[in-house]
Image: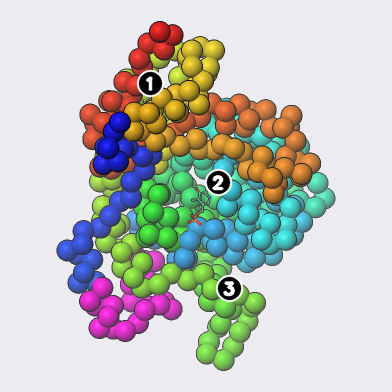
Amino acid sequence: MTSPCQQIHVTSPLLPSLEELIPCLRDIWERKWLTNNGHYHQLLEKALGEYLGVEHLSLFTNGTLTLTTALQAMQIKGEVITTPYSFVATAHSIRWNGLTPVFVDIEEKSCNIDPEQIERAITPLTTAIMPVHVYGNPCDIEAIQSIANRYGLAVIYDSAHAFGVKVNGGSILNFGDMNSLSFHATKVYNTLEGGALVLKDHHTKECIDYLKNFGFEDEVTVVMSGINSKMDEMRAAYGLLNLKGADDAITKRKRIAETYRTLLRDVKGISYFDDLPGVIHNYSYFPVFVNEKEYGMSRDGLYEKLQRNGIFGRRYFYPLISDFSVYRELPSSAPERLPVARKMSKQVICLPIYADLKIEEAERVAGLCLKNLKK
Ligand SMILES: *Cc1c(COP(=O)(O)O)cnc(C)c1O
């Protein structure tokens, strides 16, 4: 048995140094300004905007309320076309607005929503598309935008996995009408819990800033029925410090990804994504897909084998959102409509990848995937 200390999980949070954090906390205590667009909140909005290469960004308390608030702000009605191959919060945000999620199938080459399937699912009730850049792999942005333009639909990206991802030199967060980020502790960059909405213009940011603060425009004026989804000063200060380590963390993750790719390159029945030309990746996940027939062992067999060796992979995304009891009854959840999503969901296992995972540890993980299976 491995001791709990030797256990390796899929992710491990990036932490700022305590030596730097403590003076920040002292400063917050001295200012006695704990939340409501304080000093650190303003600094983090500015720093993140610069880091990510986006102009208008509003901080949130998590990445679920960003999605929920985005749909509110755009006054989306009726049906929203989305992917079943995501974290359940994507669909929940749609439901929490009294809307109907319409699931469509994904593309095998990226695990992202299939634009052709989007077009087929459009009805007179459709008003928006909510795609997800799964694992930080860019969606087919151009095809999605062209459909949205043709049918007059809003596009709200769930970019929870796409922190720092760039396409053709620019941030991926500049596409669509709004982009939602999550800074949960398990993500590439975290503020413990947190998130942000990336917006197109100053006016929209102002609207979002009111919405996340009960709709207050000033002390005596409420202009919208808003919610409370603001980020507080402690997490903003933590986030500001953590941002300094973000590039280094991504570089280290890249090395882990390269190690896995090199070692698993010729394993029959195991496939994974390579880097795409023109894309700067963030290596947020390292999914491998197990073809049971070729590999000689099922995905769950490998999952359990790793677990017996103290390595805790995650089956992201399994089950599909459309298979959870709360969504199963929707017509778009019918299994025969989602063959690719179903297949990928049955094959996927995300291997451990994080900044302080040692190369030797990644080699051990890959080694366990390599061992002669049939014997
Ligand atoms: C993490 C995640 C969310 C939710 O973000 P929270 O900050 O945990 O609320 C939404 N969508 C996807 C795809 C995610 O991975």
Give the residues drawn in magenta, as a range.
25-48
SS at mark 3? Answer: loop
Q: Amino acid at mark 1?
A: Cys
The number of callouts visible is 3
Whether residue 200 appears in this view of the structure is no
Residue 227: assigned label: 3
Give the mark toward the camera: 1 or 2: 1
Q: In the rendered view, does 298 fall on the left or right side of 335?
A: left
SS at mark 2? Answer: loop
State the residue position of label 1. 369
Q: Residue at x 43, y 61 (%)?
A: 194
Give the mark toward the camera: 1 or 3: 1
Q: Is residue 140 above or below residue 327?
A: above
- Residue lying furthest right: 124
Q: Residue at x 28, y 78 (%)?
A: 28
Label the magenta part by its dominant secondary structure: helix
State the residue position of label 2. 87
- Distance of mark 2 from mark 3, alpha carbons? 23 Å
